[in-house]
Image (cartoon, helix red, strand yellow):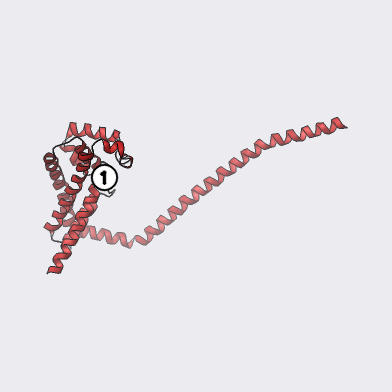
Amino acid sequence: MLEVLLHQVTLSLSFAGALILTGMGLPIPEEVFVIGAGIAAHNGLLEPWLALLACLAGAVVGDCCMYAIGYHFGHGLLRDRHWFARYMTPERERQVEEMIAKHGFKVFLTARFLVGVRGSVYVTAGILKMPFRRFLLVDFLCVSLVVSLFFGLSYVFAEAFQNLWDSIRRAEFWLTISLAVVAAGVVLFFLLRRRRRLSRIRLRRLKKKAPSHRASEEASAQETKSVA
């Protein structure tokens, strides 16, 4: 009993940790881990309530981390941390500020579906010093709607997801061959294009050298005649 409980807690923490990382900018849709948790709960690896709670907690904690970064470091984060400026440019920050001011809740709800924008929205909310209680309430509502939807669908239709996965695994060999053929074709195309470009460059160089070579021959011929 204790071993089963420990296994479920460990697996739940794993899903929660993955969702925290996606909330902090890991370029993977959080829905991937939510669907995985739903399938695991359907197959009896996790208690449904524990799996859903882990997903909700992980998503909210990840969003709060991004909010805290913006709240404590503010605009200096973009000015002094060039590595972060590549993740969120001043132009994107201004756009997000305008969207939050105009649309509020709709921006947070929409951002949950956008991997490259979600973190920017939460950082900007922190930069704007949005009250944390308000941020937490809005974020929890958005997380509850989106995570519960994907978790519920994956839990109910887990067998369909499993059948799809089995079909993908059966087709894996042919998919691998197809990708290898496509990759080889792309490499061959670029090699041939590079060879043709080098040939054209050599041909242009030869054409440039030919007139000068003929001119030197004519000059030497004239010198020979004058000597004669």
Residue at the far top in the pictured view: 226
Task: Identify the residue at horizontal 17%, vertical 33% (top origin).
Answer: 103
The answer to whether residue 175 of the structure is visible from this angle is yes
| Residue 228 position in % (x across, y down) | 88, 32
The answer to whether residue 157 of the structure is visible from this angle is no
Query: Please, what is the three-letter code of the amino acid marked with disc 1?
Result: Val
For mark 1, what is the residue?
115
Q: Is residue 180 left or right of residue 108?
A: right
Is residue 57 depicted above or below 200 in this figure? below
| Residue 6 position in % (x across, y down) | 15, 65
> How dense is the environment of label 1, judged by Cα within 10 Å: few (below 14), some, or many (20 and up)?
some
| Residue 143 position in % (x across, y down) | 16, 46
The total of numbered circles placed on residues is 1
Of the pair 133 and 26, the residue shown nearer to us: 133
Task: Identify the residue at horizontal 15%, vertical 43% (top origin).
Answer: 139
Label 1: state its secondary structure: helix
Task: Identify the residue at horizontal 18%, vertical 51% (top origin).
Answer: 58
The quadrant of the picture occupied by the N terminus is: bottom left
Residue at the far right in the pictured view: 228
Of the pair 162 and 36, the residue shown nearer to us: 36
Of the pair 84 and 153, the residue shown nearer to us: 84
